[in-house]
Image (spheres, helix red, strand yellow):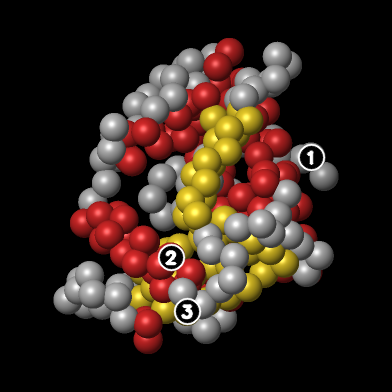
Amino acid sequence: FNMQESVNQDRERYIGGSDIPIIMEISPFKTRFDLLLEKAGYKKDEFKGNVYTEYGNTLEPKIRDFINSAVTEPFVEGKHVREAEPDEIIGARIHTDGENVDTILEIKTTGEVTDDITDYKLYLVQLVYYMTLTGKPYGLLAVYKRPEDMSTDFNPDNLHLFNIARGEDLTESLVAEIEKAIDHFIEDLARVKENPFITEEELLPAEIDS
């Protein structure tokens, strides 16, 4: 298997890290309803990767090696699977870009970078989900600015690092948002599994009469 295939295998049985922004409806790449159909087994995830995901896959080990040259506890890739309990309809499975004894490393390559961590909610929700599932108290978000010429030579000047920790207001508010979004998603997934012909409109919360 290549990495993309192994990540995609049995995907409908688990909620993965890349599903979190979609579940929270902040992803520009896929709608929540499409993801519901995929997890219910009614639709296939046809995404096979593109030039940007390939670039990210090429740079990721270089970025991790650079970070590891400066830390005492090196980061290694990790995989964690929590199978669904008998009373659950979906489990959880994550592949981390790196982890050590107390920190999860999340690596992203992007065309736009900023110095404001709150601009990276799309990435942070994935990192916070990983921290929650693994019980690790710290997270390190490594954002690498993809050069216009798509050079795969690592340039440390393009790397921006952000640290987060459990207990901080930003992290805890994201934890609460993620948990609420997942609970709602699982409720809707049960409804979709019961009714393959359900529409997106039927899943929307009913207007409350004033």
Q: Which residue is mark 1?
A: 209
Residue 25, horizontal then vertical, whole percent? 54, 49
Q: Which residue is mark 2?
A: 64
Marks 3 and 2 sit apart, C-alpha to C-alpha, by: 13 Å
Marks 2 and 1 sit apart, C-alpha to C-alpha, by: 53 Å
Q: Which residue is mark 3?
A: 160
Placement of 58 over or under 12, stated as above or below: below
Residue 157, horizontal then vertical, whole percent? 37, 86
Kind of residue indicated by mark 3: His
- Of labels 3 and 2, earlier in sequence is 2
Which residue appears at 27% of the width and 59% of the height?
A: 58
Which residue appears at 64% of the width and 61% of the height?
A: 103
Kind of residue indicated by mark 1: Asp
Kind of residue indicated by mark 2: Arg
For the residue labelled by badge 3, is the local secondary structure a helix, a strand or a loop?
Answer: strand
Q: Are marks 3 and 2 in contact (CB under 8 Å)?
A: no
Which residue appears at 21% of the width and 56% of the height?
A: 51
Marks 1 and 3 sit apart, C-alpha to C-alpha, by: 48 Å
Q: Quadrant of residue 191?
A: top right
Image position of 104 (left or right of 52):
right
Mark 2 crowdedness (10 Å alpha carbons): few <14, some 14-19, many ≥20: many
For the residue labelled by badge 2, is the local secondary structure a helix, a strand or a loop?
Answer: helix
Residue 167, horizontal then vertical, whole percent? 81, 65
- Of labels 1 and 3, earlier in sequence is 3
Q: Are marks 2 and 1 in contact (CB under 8 Å)?
A: no
**Closer to the camera in the image, 209 or 109:** 109
**Residue 29 is at least partly visible in this image:** yes
Residue 147 tag number: none
